């Protein structure tokens, strides 16, 4: 029996999958022989390969497939794994009769003649619970129990549900500081580095905030609330709610202290706009001179000329929200589950150096070899962020409570009121 929270998460994931499909993607190939595996991508993210904008997703899938086929020394590739591999993007947009509701969409997923899937975390959880994906735990235990230790555990956990693992992660997306070093120099502020804590963040954001003669902000020094204030709670050793019971924890002193700091950034220091989120289209077409000097953003979300990346300033502890975008899963109806599992490992292998931020520790250690556009300090900041990473919570109720927190602090509500309203969401 699926809980209300799981249903909400699944509905969101399925809606995202339905809306994110490129209309020009070629249909999923048909199986041509018994030893052939079909890799169906239900979602996809940017990789470090040249794909061309219009055909970005299908071209990337084909390039990954070709890379695995050409890696004849890979024990998990087709040459040594004893299979052939064909691939394509699978979207509800391609269905002759498009699914009209959740039931029809799940039926559409179940009908795939595919062996391996690319899925996002919420898709993996929902499709695993619905029996579309095979649990990987027994396959991994029989093969190599140390396999999971090669990945950051909080990324692996994002693909778990109901006590089972339904995909291996491919990439990671840590929240980091995106900042304008030229503007920093103009204002006499040193670049963000390991020495920064919360007091430094507030003081330097104040120095970076430009105001006109009437005191109105012309350029903000900081924006931190794009993905909520998880970073503030966690860095202050606080929780929004108990992960197991969802009992509200915002009344704890550490939580109220963290939220007071966020409120002060908004209304006392006045260094960040009282907005409930950064809407990409509002800033992407504007001059960099109008952007906040610093933004807390997931690493893969933005690319702006001149801006650079740094790790989040530390609180009591270093704790960084990290989201996974892509995972590789085995279909429950795979023709040969063991061979499909071999292909899964091969795809994860070949995609590690192609991911903007890989999910596996050995690939992250070599990130500087793969990513030539980053400065050495940025590579080190990404590596540090992943070492102190923490997975974003899967519970839609916790996210709803966080949205309540962001909105309440933006309005200027006192922390006690913010906490009361957020706890009422969690405990409803």
Image (tube, rainbow, N blue to C red):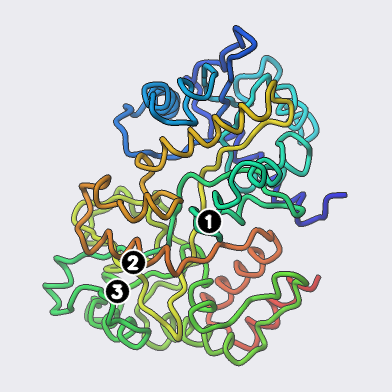
Q: CA distance from mark 3 to mark 2?
A: 12 Å
Does the CB distance between marks 2 and 1 fall below 8 Å?
Answer: no
Callout 3 secondary element: loop
Q: 318 or 231, which is in the foreground?
A: 318
* Quadrant housing residue 143: top right
Taking the image as shown, residue 67 lies to the left or right of residue 94, namely: left
Q: Residue drawn 53% across and 77% down?
A: 234
Q: Which mark is residue 149?
A: 1
Instruction: Determine the residue positioned at 47% across, 19% down.
Output: 24
Does 405 sit above or below residue 171? below
User: Is 51 above or below relative to 426?
Assistant: above
Q: Which residue is mark 2?
A: 177
Which label's residue is closer to the chain start, 3 or 2? Answer: 2
Q: Position of residue 129 (x, y in %)?
A: 77, 44
Label 2: how many Cα within 10 Å (few below 14, some 14–19, many 20+): many
Sequence order check, earlier mark of 2 and 1:
1
Label 3 belongs to which residue?
221
Along the line of sight, which residue is nearer the eye, 103 or 65? 65
Compared to 156, does 339 lie above or below? above
* Picture residue at 81% right of the left edge, 70% below the top: 428
Quarter of the view holding residue 269: bottom left
- CA gap, disc 3 to disc 1? 39 Å
Residue 92 screen position, x and y as percent: 64, 26
Residue 86 in view of the camera: no
Residue 284's label in the rendered image is: none
Which marked residue is nearer to the observer: mark 2 or mark 1?
Answer: 1
Is residue 191 left or right of 71 when viewed as pictured? left
- The residues bearing labels 2 and 1 have C-alpha atoms spaced at a distance of 28 Å
């Amino acid at each position: 029996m699926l809980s209300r929270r799981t249903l909400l998460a699944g509905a969101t994931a399925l809606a995202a999958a339905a809306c994110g499909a490129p209309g020009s993607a070629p249909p999923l190939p048909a199986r041509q022989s018994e030893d052939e595996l079909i890799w169906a991508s239900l979602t996809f993210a940017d990789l470090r390969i040249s794909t061309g904008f219009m055909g970005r997703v299908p071209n990337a899938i084909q390039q990954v497939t070709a890379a695995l086929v050409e890696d004849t020394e890979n024990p998990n590739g087709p040459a040594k794994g004893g299979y052939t591999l064909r691939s394509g993007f699978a979207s509800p947009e391609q269905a002759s009769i498009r699914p009209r509701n959740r039931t029809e969409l799940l039926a559409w997923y179940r009908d795939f003649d595919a062996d391996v899937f690319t899925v996002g975390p919420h898709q993996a959880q929902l499709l695993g619970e619905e029996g579309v994906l095979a649990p990987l735990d027994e396959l991994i235990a029989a093969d190599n129990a140390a396999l999971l230790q090669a990945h950051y555990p909080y990324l692996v956990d994002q693909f778990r549900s109901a006590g089972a693992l339904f995909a291996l992660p491919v990439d990671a997306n840590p929240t980091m500081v995106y900042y304008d070093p030229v503007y920093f120099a103009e204002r006499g502020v040193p670049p963000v580095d390991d020495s920064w804590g919360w007091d430094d963040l507030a003081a330097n954001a104040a120095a970076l905030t430009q105001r006109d003669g009437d005191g109105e902000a012309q350029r903000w020094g900081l924006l931190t609330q794009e993905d909520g204030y998880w970073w503030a709670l966690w860095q202050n050793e606080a929780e929004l709610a108990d992960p197991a019971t969802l009992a509200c924890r915002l009344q704890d002193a550490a939580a109220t202290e963290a939220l007071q700091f966020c409120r002060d950034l908004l209304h006392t220091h006045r260094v960040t706009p009282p907005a409930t989120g950064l809407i990409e289209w509002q800033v992407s077409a504007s001059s960099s001179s109008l952007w906040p000097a610093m933004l807390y953003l997931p690493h893969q979300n933005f690319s702006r000329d001149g801006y650079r990346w740094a790790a989040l300033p530390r609180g009591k502890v270093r704790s960084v929200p990290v989201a996974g975008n892509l995972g590789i899963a085995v279909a429950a109806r795979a023709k040969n589950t063991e061979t499909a599992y071999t292909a899964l490992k091969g795809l994860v292998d070949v995609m590690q150096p192609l991911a903007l931020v890989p999910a596996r520790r050995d690939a992250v250690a070599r990130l500087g070899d793969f990513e030539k556009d980053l400065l050495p300090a940025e590579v080190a900041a990404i590596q540090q962020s992943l070492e102190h990473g923490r997975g974003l919570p899967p519970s839609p109720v916790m996210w709803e409570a966080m949205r309540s927190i962001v909105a309440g602090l933006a309005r200027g509500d006192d922390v006690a009121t913010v906490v009361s309203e957020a706890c009422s969401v969690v405990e409803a």
